[in-house]
Amino acid sequence: MKFFYSNMCSHCEDMKPVVEKLELEGLQIEKIDIDKASKEQLKELDKSCGGVPYFTNGGRKICGATDIGKLKELAKD
């Protein structure tokens, strides 16, 4: 699963403890800071939500802040 975020985004900051909890449970999450992201990574964001926080896994996505249960569902293959 990928987590697009910005350190200047309050909603992203709210999601960081949730992401950390999922990582402690063994979920692999690629964290992508959009302020430091490559052009290719930003293209993936632009074709989807266009903003952060944004979570994606395969073809599924969640735009905006969400709860841990929905992220666990997204993480399922």
Image (cartoon, rainbow, N blue to C red):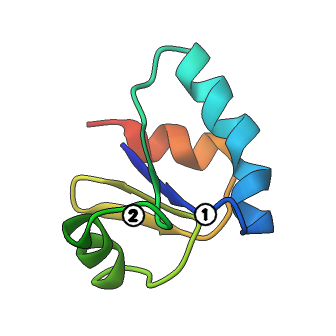
| Location of mark 1 (residue) | 6
* Residue at position x 80%, y 66% in the image: 10
Query: In the picture, residue 29 is in which quadrant?
Result: top left
Q: Is residue 63 above or below residue 25?
A: below
| Location of mark 2 (residue) | 61
Distance between mark 2 and mark 1 Cα atoms: 17 Å
Query: In the picture, residue 56 is in which quadrant?
Result: bottom left
- Residue 40 lies, in percent from the top left, at 19, 68
Query: Callout 1 environment at 10 Å: few (<14), some (14 to 19), or many (20+)?
Result: some
Query: Callout 2 environment at 10 Å: few (<14), some (14 to 19), or many (20+)?
Result: some
Q: Callout 1, which amino acid?
A: Ser
- Residue 7 lies, in percent from the top left, at 68, 59
Q: Callout 2, which amino acid?
A: Lys
Secondary structure found at label 2: strand
- Residue 8 lies, in percent from the top left, at 72, 67
First in sequence: mark 2 or mark 1? 1
Locate the N terminus and report the quarter of the image it occupies.
Answer: top left
Q: Is residue 34 above or below residue 32?
A: below
Front-lying residue, 44 or 27: 44
Q: Which mark lies nearer to you, 2 or 1?
A: 1
